[in-house]
Image (cartoon, rainbow, N blue to C red):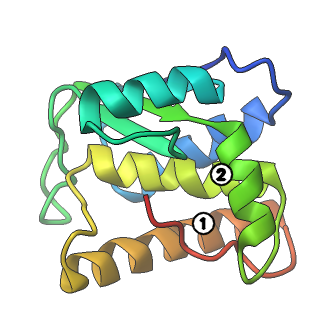
Amino acid sequence: MSIDVNNESGTEVDEQAILDIARYALARMRIHPLSELSVIVVDTGAMEQLHIQWMDLPGPTDVMSFPMDELRPPTKDDDEPPQGLLGDIVLCPEVAEQQGKDAPTQHSMDEELQLLTVHGVLHLLGYDHEMPDEKAEMFGLQAAIVDGWRAEKGLTGPSPAPTVS
């Protein structure tokens, strides 16, 4: 799995954790090991520009996903996953920090960025949360991935609450 993390935000973030949880999420979703992903960490100004340009919405947001080859997880256990470019995930640590503080189970900016990385991966794989049934599926999968990664890393305490993007 080729995953690039590029921090252009000026904020210190745990890039290794972002890389690790992205790799874990893609492996759990059975994405081809030769697929490629890019994660870019930006400041609020850059995120706001992207949010306006691509979503026609004001202000910065927490995470945006830009799929490339529209890869999907294999539907059967014996299916060979396709290889390709997953796309880009853009994260904003300033928004993530505020969301972590405002969450019912307060948590750190880095924990929120880990959750948002998984959220972005799922969006790249075609998951969405517009409809209640889609939201339940996506957020359930998101929680399972984050919890599984945290358990594998030996991290304790409650996982961050699901993020709505």
Secondary structure under tag 2 reads helix
Is residue 69 something that shows in the picture?
yes
As drawn, the label of residue 146 is 1
Callout 2, which amino acid? Answer: Gln
**Residue at image point 23% right, 85% down:** 132
Q: Is residue 35 left or right of residue 100?
A: left
Q: Are marks 1 and 2 in contact (CB under 8 Å)?
A: yes
Total marks drawn? 2
Image coordinates of residue 10 in percent, x first then y, are 79, 18
Image coordinates of residue 89 in percent, x first then y, are 44, 33
As drawn, the label of residue 114 is 2
- In depth, the one of 112 and 35 nearer the eye is 112
As drawn, 86 above or below 71:
above
In the rendered structure, which disc, 1 or 2, sits on the residue that comes first in sequence? 2
As drawn, the label of residue 84 is none
Callout 1, which amino acid? Answer: Val
What is the spatial separation of the Cα atoms under label 1 and label 2, in whole angstroms? 8 Å
**Residue at image point 27% right, 38% down:** 55
- In depth, the one of 109 and 76 nearer the eye is 109
As drawn, 105 above or below 80:
below
Image coordinates of residue 137 in percent, x first then y, are 30, 79
Quadrant in which residue 70 is drawn? top left
Neighbours of disc 1 within 10 Å: few (<14), some (14-19), many (20+): many
Is residue 1 something that shows in the picture?
no
Q: Quadrant of the C terminus?
A: bottom left
**Residue at image point 20% right, 65% down:** 77
